[in-house]
Amino acid sequence: MEYFVVTLFSESGAFAYLISLALSIVVSILGVVPSVFITAANISYFGFAQGLYLSIAGEALGAVVSFYLYRKGISHTFSTKNKWIKKLQLTKGMEAFFLIIALRIFPFIPSGAVTLAGAASKIHTINFAVSSTIGKIPALLIEAYTVKQILVWDFQSKIVLGILSLIIILFLFIRRNHLKNNEKETRVGQRNTEDHTDR
């Protein structure tokens, strides 16, 4: 994916900046596609500093556009079990401002979920844009530095990283299914207990 984007930048000339921003906006709207390949392409093509600034700008624009679309569209139907995302939906003002910063920094909260919950809350668009960007900067710095290191690795090192990534994803997938099965068993047990009590 990174190679495809870099090729697209090369063929676009002066429009490469606009394409990078447009791709960041599309990824933000989708909410489930990782933006790391855009960060990698930006750093690979534009250099570390310029690529990082462009990634931050793209993330900021993407968050604002997706926030606006979510607020106009599907935010009222959004529901989640995450207590922090739920809390964000019920907050406003400076509390929501600082909560968005914290959720953006925290790596295990999906970016799309934060944007969607923010759209369902009462926070103002400008406050969301500022807090979202502030929260994204530390995460992007870490992501950009990691990408920079990976780009200088040899082919064998990248293969090892790919295998380790697949193992981690597989482990998380199995763990998630295990937790879901435990929740279902707990619910069934509670229902059986309630039925038994009613009798």
Image (tube, helix red, strand yellow):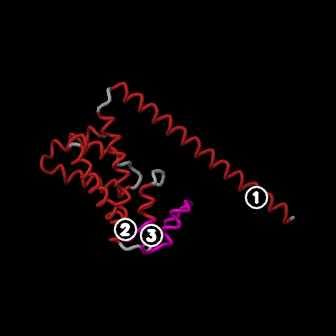
Q: Which residue is mark 3?
A: 96
How far apart are the alpha carbons under marks 2 and 3? 8 Å
Which residue is drawn at the image coordinates 58% and 41% (left, top)? 174
- The residue under the point 66% across, 52% down is 183
2 or 3: tag closer to the N-terminus: 3
Where is residue 175? Give x, y as percent: 59, 43
Q: Residue at x 16, y 41 (%)?
A: 10
Of 17 and 197, which appears nearest the observer? 17
* Residue at which label 1 appears: 190
Label pair 2/3, CB-CB below 8 angstroms? yes
- Residue 195 locus on image (x, y percent): 81, 62
The amino acid on which the numbered mark 2 sits, given as a three-letter code, is Phe
Question: Dot 2 surroundings within 10 Å: few (below 14), some, or many (20 or more)?
Answer: many
Q: How far is disc 1 from disc 3 in space, using C-alphas?
A: 36 Å
Asked which secondary structure carries label 3, the reply is helix
Which residues make up the magenta segment? Answer: 70-98
Among the two numbered marks 1 and 3 on one chain, the one whose residue lies closer to the N terminus: 3
**Which residue is label 2 attached to?**
128
Q: Amino acid at mark 3?
A: Ala
**What type is the residue that disc 1 sits on?**
Gln
Which quadrant, please, contains the C terminus? bottom right
Q: Residue at x 42, y 72 (%)?
A: 94
Task: Count up the numbered dots.
Answer: 3
